[in-house]
Amino acid sequence: MALKQFPDDPKLEKAKKHLEAAVNLSGEYHKTYWSIFWNTSTERTKKRIREKCNNLAFDCYSKMLDMADEIEAYIDTKNAEKVAPPKKWRQLIFDLKLAFDWIEREHPTEIRYKQLSLF
């Protein structure tokens, strides 16, 4: 939903690309997770799919964080210029907040798993 409401501002193009990547990674996660029959697959297959899903969920979350950094920089620029935000800005921020809440609620284990394995 947030992709449809993204303002057409060249300064937000990078943020939009990060969001598009996050949406694509989320779709890939869904496709990968449902690519096997969990009840009848071997433990080795399940482990491989879980690992791939962990990476996809973490990468999706990372893209969302990158997008948030870009939006924060954009807001700082607009505040410094004393320019009003684009129309429907509140709705966009609300939709992005919902997206963050969703990914943190649906994939907390995958995100933490990858974070811990990086350290």
Image (cartoon, rainbow, N blue to C red):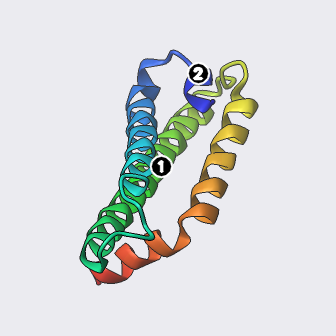
Q: Which residue is mark 2?
A: 4
Q: Image quarter for residue 70?
A: top left
75 or 112, nearer to the observer: 112
6 on left or right of 15:
right
Q: Which residue is mark 1?
A: 64
Residue drawn at x 58%, y 37% as measured from the top left: 75
- Residue 44 at what x, y percent from top left? 24, 77
Residue drawn at x 55%, y 27% as measured from the top left: 3
35 or 107, nearer to the observer: 35
Q: Quadrant of the N terminus?
A: top right
**Mark 2 and mark 1: Cα distance apart in space:** 16 Å
Q: Secondary structure at mark 1?
A: helix
Q: Residues within 10 Å of mark 2 (few under 14, many from 20)?
A: few
Instruction: Give the residue at the far front of this rendering.
Output: 40
Q: Amino acid at mark 1?
A: Met
82 or 21, nearer to the observer: 21
113 on left or right of 86:
left
- Residue 100 at what x, y percent from top left? 60, 53
Contact, mark 2 vs mark 1 (Cβ under 8 Å): no
Residue drawn at x 57%, y 20% as measured from the top left: 7
14 on left or right of 77:
left
- Residue 104 at what x, y percent from top left? 59, 63
Q: Residues within 10 Å of mark 1 (few under 14, many from 20)?
A: many
Task: From this view, report whether residue 72 is shown above or below residue 58.
Answer: above
Q: Amino acid at mark 2?
A: Lys
Question: How many numbered discs sit on the rendered protein?
Answer: 2
- Residue 74 at what x, y percent from top left? 51, 35
Instruction: Give the residue at the far top of this rendering.
Output: 8
Task: From this view, report whether residue 46 is shown above or below residue 85.
Answer: below
Q: Quadrant of the C terminus?
A: bottom left
9 or 102, nearer to the observer: 102
